[in-house]
Image (tube, rainbow, N blue to C red):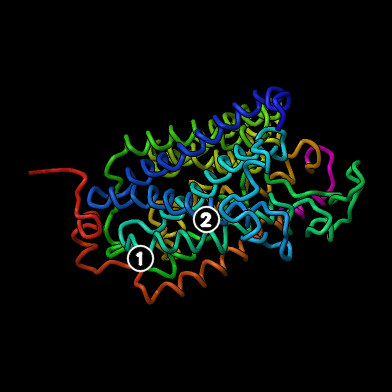
Amino acid sequence: MSPDEVLANSGNAAWMLMSASLVLLMTPGVAFFYGGMSRSKSVLNMMMMSFGAMAVIAVIYVLWGWSMSYGTDDIGGIFANPFEFFGLKDSITDADGNFIAGAFGYPNVIDIAFQVTFAMITTALISGALAERVKFGTWLLFSGVWVTIVYFPLAHMVWGGGLLSGSEDGLAAKMFGTTDDGEGGLVASVAPIDFAGGTVVHINAGIAAFVLAVIIGKRIGFGKTAFRPHNLPFVMLGAALLWFGWFGFNAGSAFAADGNAGLAWVNTTSATSAAILGWLLTERIRDGRATSLGAASGAVAGLVAITPAAGALSPVGSLVLGAIAGILSALAVGLKFKFGYDDSLDVVGVHLVSGLWGTVAIGFFGTSTGLFYGGDYKQLVVQIVIALFALVFTGILTAVIAFALKPLGWRVSAEEEAQGIDESEHAETAYDFA
């Protein structure tokens, strides 16, 4: 990039570097959120699962993650050639040592920084379904394999011009045709909308969590013993860090410091606040009490729901979207007891349910193409199709990976689980009660 180009885009570059840092903070936020929800004898392991995922994925992303997600050598619309930009070659500077401009005008390396944080948080979210019973080494290996086989391809399909994007070769174009993009090319007439990761992050992580919870099995005593959160202030702190970081997640997905970023910011706050109220109201009617755990969980449900829709809704539409998300997830977290799967920390009830709702609801509340704003059925159909595709794609591949790793051993022994996974896996305890 020339000095003039660098100067012209310096404001956007600064915003995107800040956004990348905010999203990076979210994974430690998940560590606190999940750590507080677990029992005291398992809190370190729960937090280590997030930190371990960050370490594994940062290394992999530099090597082949960026190339698989955003390379130009497309393979069947599913993923890009992992060797095209292997080790970030030809991705940062050109032959003269000048920084290469990215798709949005600022240096491409900033986009790389932003996108790796999404891969980290998505994988870390899955760990909440596996609390207190999974070997740390197997989890680390799963993280690397899953992000390669599932996350990078889905990111390419949705954001990298693949099957679930608005490209002329995508599913949406095959369903409802193409239109001129004004630059001599063709794009889908009705493009899928996933502003910041409803399919790529939340449906993806949610269905992976469900599949693993079913395959790996329940904790000892599930359904008979009350697994109470050991530190609710940790949970509230984690939720606060997630909410703060989510402004980078959503507003940063505008890829510029502009009005779209501002709209995403306002919509994110609106939906999250409404979701807290929706969850607390549901608790009050059902249980007679409004809880701090409910407030924290409701906040996350609202953040999840608005993620795909942050740039497509009005603030009032975001209020409705968030309130419904809070109610749906508050009701959904109890399904694990009805159907007998141990989604330990409610990844399915919060991320899968609200992720599905937020993705599909764009077909109703989108201000440009939603049914409630004068649009026809097509956007709703496209949103449903991409959500179902993500469910099936991730569900099948996660099951394959889970079964392939079974010979290594997924679970700690019954004795180690009863004693506490912190001591057996890490030779540490969070609290000294001597």
Measured as percent of width and height from the top left, residue 156 is found at 67, 55
- Label 1: how many Cα within 10 Å (few below 14, some 14–19, many 20+): many
Residue beneath disc 2: 206
Q: Residues within 10 Å of mark 2 (few under 14, many from 20)?
A: many
State the predominant SS element of the stretch in magenta. Answer: helix
Determine the secondary structure under disc 2: helix
Name the residue carrying label 1: 218
Within the magenta stretch, is there residue 377?
yes
Q: Quadrant of residue 426?
A: bottom left
Give the residues in magenta.
372-383
For mark 1, give the secondary structure.
loop
Looking at the image, is mark 2 or mark 1 earlier in the sequence? 2
- Residue at 19% across, 67% down: 415
Say which quadrant the N terminus sits in.
top right
Across and down, in percent, residue 144 comes to 47, 60
Question: What amino acid is found at the position of numbered circle 2 in the picture?
Answer: Gly
Alpha carbons under labels 2 and 1: distance apart: 17 Å
Residue 13, relative to residue 322: is it above or below?
above
Front of the two marks 2 and 1: 2
Type of the residue with mark 1 = Lys
Q: Position of residue 419 (x, y in %)?
A: 18, 60
Q: Residue furthest bottom?
A: 407
Picture coordinates of residue 6, whole percent (x, y): 68, 27
Residue farthest toward the front in the current orientation of the protein: 96
The residue positioned 46% from the left and 74% from the top of the image is 403
Residue 332 seen in the figure: no
**Relative to 149, is 352 above or below?**
above
